[in-house]
Amino acid sequence: MKRTQPTKLMILDAAEELFAESGFKDTSLRQITGRAGVNLASVNYHFGSKKELIQSVLERYLQVFMHRLNESFDALMNTASVKLHDVFTSFVEPLLALDEVRPKGATVFLQLLGRGYTDSQGHLRWYFATHYGEVLEKLVQLVKRTQPDLPDSEIFWRLHFTLGTFVFTMASSDALIEIAETDFDEAVSLQGLVNHVIPYIAAGVSAPVVGFKN
Amino acid sequence: MKRTQPTKLMILDAAEELFAESGFKDTSLRQITGRAGVNLASVNYHFGSKKELIQSVLERYLQVFMHRLNESFDALMNTASVKLHDVFTSFVEPLLALDEVRPKGATVFLQLLGRGYTDSQGHLRWYFATHYGEVLEKLVQLVKRTQPDLPDSEIFWRLHFTLGTFVFTMASSDALIEIAETDFDEAVSLQGLVNHVIPYIAAGVSAPVVGFKN
DNA sequence: AGTCATATTAAACAGGTGTTTAAAATCTAC
DNA sequence: GTAGATTTTAAACACCTGTTTAATATGACT
């Protein structure tokens, strides 16, 4: 067997950069192979199709991230009094660990996540539920423990709102950081952005329940 | 002059349906003209380009929505003690008024908004700021009045988080409503969804300020 | 009726897309 | 060193995109 590393890796690296910049659909295989310095056809040879390439790019990060997140959750579940803020803070370490996978890994991953969710709607949702359902289940359990009075359906709503906040924020993180810098002289890193958003979502999820008309 | 109505209107109606369903980039002019029952070239004849068609579709709703929202804000600014919840509630009436523009108008508009923001990033943001900057300015002022201790930069962050929550929720409203129905036996309308999200974003925006490391 | 601007149409245009093919190159192992 | 599997390559494929062209049709007005 030939060294299977370089071309396949070059494709993954180039693809993830371009995907994060411009989204999945607006990135062509010719752009990817151009930046990677490999032949166009090698994408289909190594990955089968563009769809599978996208999945491979995401998986590289998801494996690391979800594994660490799972551990964070386990640690938290053995804690006596869990605060909601702690639940969301436990996302931070697994996230920043991605910078060790690749330079700027955390930023890229979050942007990819945002792209994936808004580009393909249902597809990624299903992928998440089937591959990482247990982790999500632990998240729900933890939230439920900190908010015992919140009905299950309300937890569902609020976690989805949270996902939206997070994904949207991260998908446009570049723009937000730039605006903050020019308009408010505030130099913000990705970590800083996360620190800003956590109090927001924690307050949202723990908002008082009121009676609704659906 | 010939009756300039039918074809141009047919195109707008067909385009907005398809845009809401599949996004701007995934909707082709041939799909639009096909559904509208008009010739392909008539899009370029009447609107110039696809980009201008997208703008026209959005404008039809934005004019009505922003005008009403502006009035709601004006009314609120003359009120003695404004609550944050009131600020976000004032979005509801202008929104539901869109159902009079066209059937399902409110849903379509929100989906379009979500599509526009995630599809094209900067372009729409600029369009908003230049065309409806005064209305946004009033929103910031109202929020500032209800949260006097919140720094300007923090208001900026939290309103953007709110935009993300809203846009994401509405862009995937169909899926969310369907999940709520199957998993929780909860029949939710669009109005109901809005009622769910308002307490969440109100709590998020009014979250206590803490010291950050950026 | 005839004029003229407006509107519609079929056809082609130029460029981009993901994927497939079959030949050439490369590496591994006997 | 040669056989055999693996990888790389250039080229073509079939299809789709938004836009333009030039001819035709339609309507209002004198």
Image: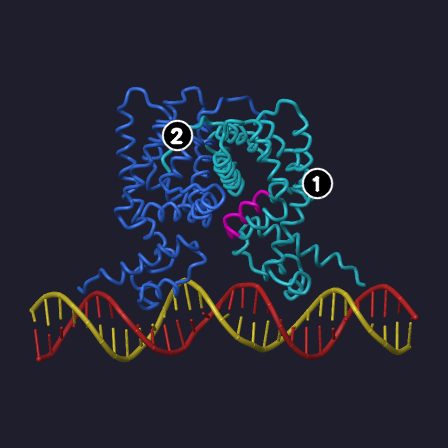
Chain colours: A blue, B cyan, C yellow, D red
Task: Identify the element where label 2 is drawn.
Answer: loop
Badge 2: how crowded within 10 Å, few (<14), some, or many (20+)?
A: few
Examine the structure image and report whether residue B112 is included in the region drawn in magenta: yes
Mark 2 is on which residue type? Gly
Q: Main secondary structure of the magenta part?
A: helix
Q: Quadrant of the N terminus of chain A?
A: bottom left
Judge left or right: residue B12 versus residue B204: right
Q: Which residue is mark 2?
A: B211
Badge 1 amino acid: Glu
- Of badges 2 and 1, the one in the foreground is 2
Answer above or below: position of B29 versus B150: below
Question: Disc 1 designates what residue?
Answer: B100
Residue located farthest toward the front when viewing the structure as drawn = A185
Stretch of the chain drawn in magenta:
B110-122
Q: Position of residue B74 (x, y in %)?
A: 68, 33
Q: Residue A66: x, y in percent? A: 30, 40
Say which chain tag 1 marks.
Answer: B
Q: Judge the density around disc 1: few (<14), some (14-19), many (≥20) Cα neighbours within 10 Å.
A: few
Instruction: Pick the residue in front: A12 or A141.
Output: A12
Q: Give the quadrant of the C terminus of chain A.
A: top right
Question: Residue D7, image x and y in percent?
Answer: 24, 66
Question: In the rendering, at what x and y percent does residue B58 appear?
Answer: 62, 49
- Of helix, strand and loop, which one carries label 1? helix
x 32%, y 68%: residue = A39
